[in-house]
Image (spheres, rainbow, N blue to C red):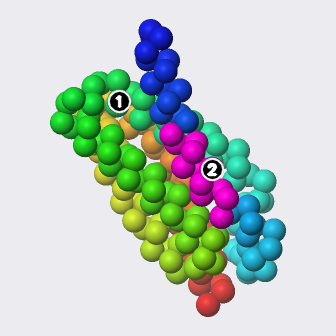
Amino acid sequence: MNRRSWGQLLTAIIIVQVAGLIGSVATFTSITTWYNTLVKPSFNPPNWIFGPVWTTLYILMGIALFLVWRNGLKKKRVKFAFWVFIVHLFVNAGWSIVFFGLHSLFGGFVMIIILVLFIVALIWKFYEIDKRAAYLLIPYIVWVSFAGILNTAVWLLNR
């Protein structure tokens, strides 16, 4: 990799981490207050696990974005996949804002369904450009699917 590639990789990872940081602002203020008052299912992981998991997933997402981006944004399908990824980051951060910031369990459920659909689309589009990028998103969709199940359980337990 040349200097430009390293810059692209770092930029891609930073873009994704910033989206995570935006979502975490809403999360941090609610995790020890509102979220602690909710009834949670037995399979709810301890709170400390979410930070390391999301940080790892955001790094993998950044690497995936880089692998697609380095194919050239002048190519129509690369540019489309890149922008779908950017829009998806807003949905990703939006889930935290809706669920934790607005304390909307049902809204979080709706947002996570939209997020899963975006991730499926991303895996498909990334696969067409760089299979490695698509594979890097597999842990992400697995975790978000689990988060969707958890979100649904919390919503149903607290209606």
> Where residue 69 sits in the image (x, y, percent)?
35, 30
> Where residue 61 sits in the image (x, y, percent)?
49, 39
Magenta stretch?
Answer: 15-26
Q: Is residue 82 visible?
A: yes
Q: Residues within 10 Å of mark 1 (few under 14, many from 20)?
A: many
Relative height, residue 10 to residue 120 (above, below)? above
In front here: 109 or 89?
89
In front here: 16 or 111?
16
**Residue identified by numbered label 1:** 69
Residue occupying image coordinates x 26% and y 35%: 78
> Where residue 4 sits in the image (x, y, percent)?
43, 15
Residue occupying image coordinates x 38% and y 38%: 134
Q: Extreme bottom residue here?
A: 159
Q: Is residue 91 left or right of residue 82?
A: right
Relative height, residue 129 to residue 20 (above, below)? above
Instruction: Give amino acid for label 2.
Output: Leu
Q: Is residue 32 left or right of residue 141?
A: right
Instruction: Give amino acid for label 1.
Output: Trp
> Where residue 120 sits in the image (x, y, percent)?
35, 52
Q: Marks 1 and 2, Cα distance to the nearest angstrom?
A: 22 Å
| The disc label shown at residue 20, or none | none
In front here: 41 or 36?
36
In front here: 21 or 40?
21
Q: Is residue 153 visible?
A: no
Helix, strand or loop for disc 1: helix
Q: Main secondary structure of the magenta part?
A: helix
Residue occupying image coordinates x 71% and y 49%: 51
Helix, strand or loop for disc 2: helix
**Residue identified by numbered label 2:** 21
Q: Quadrant of the N terminus?
A: top left
**Residue 58 is inside the magenta segment:** no
Q: Is residue 94 left or right of residue 41?
A: left
